[in-house]
Amino acid sequence: MLRGAIVRYEIGPLTFDRAQTVNEFKVEVIVSVEFEDVHQGKILWKENEFRAWKSYQQDQGPTAEDDAFSAAVATLATDIVSRTVEGW
């Protein structure tokens, strides 16, 4: 069984121009994930701060932050699947 929860969602500046105006933002998603063998009652792996991030620019439109969040979650999903099956 795979269990997970979003622990933190953060947005912060990533790059600045010469006038110290933010050019690019970073969306970071941190999750707690646990993979359990329910037949044996054994935790196969656990990560309290599994994280992924994506960047976006304000001028990319009103959905830029949401798009970056979705991309970060997709990266997390891929990384979690990889971590889960790497032992097989």
Image: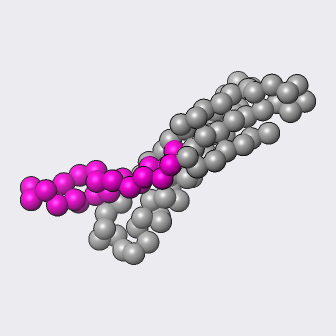
- Majority secondary structure of magenta residues: strand
Which x, y percent locates residue 48?
Answer: 58, 35
Quadrant the C terminus occupies: top right
**Residue found at the far front of this picture:** 7
Q: Residue, x 78% and y 32% (percent of image)?
A: 36
Q: Residue, x 55% and y 38% (percent of image)?
A: 50
Q: What stretch is highlighted in magenta?
A: 8-30
Query: Quarter-wise, where is residue 21 in the image?
Result: bottom left
Which x, y percent locates residue 43?
Answer: 75, 27
Left or right placement of residue 34 versus residue 60 in this view: right
Q: State how the image is colored.
A: one colour
Left or right placement of residue 43 versus residue 18 in this view: right
Query: Quarter-wise, where is residue 78 in the image?
Result: top right
**Residue found at the far bottom of this picture:** 62
Residue 48, placed above or below residue 53? above
* Residue 64 belongs to magenta span: no
How many numbered discs, if any? 0
Of residues 25 and 4, which is closer to you in this image? 4
Quadrant the N terminus occupies: top right
Which x, y percent locates residue 45?
Answer: 68, 28
Is residue 76 something that shows in the picture?
A: no
**Residue found at the far left of this picture:** 19
Residue 61, placed above or below residue 26? below
Q: Residue, x 82% and y 30% (percent of image)?
A: 37
* Residue 16 belongs to magenta span: yes
Left or right placement of residue 57 versus residue 37 in this view: left
Of residues 53 and 87, which is closer to you in this image? 53
Is residue 18 something that shows in the picture?
A: yes
Q: Residue, x 29% and y 71% (percent of image)?
A: 59
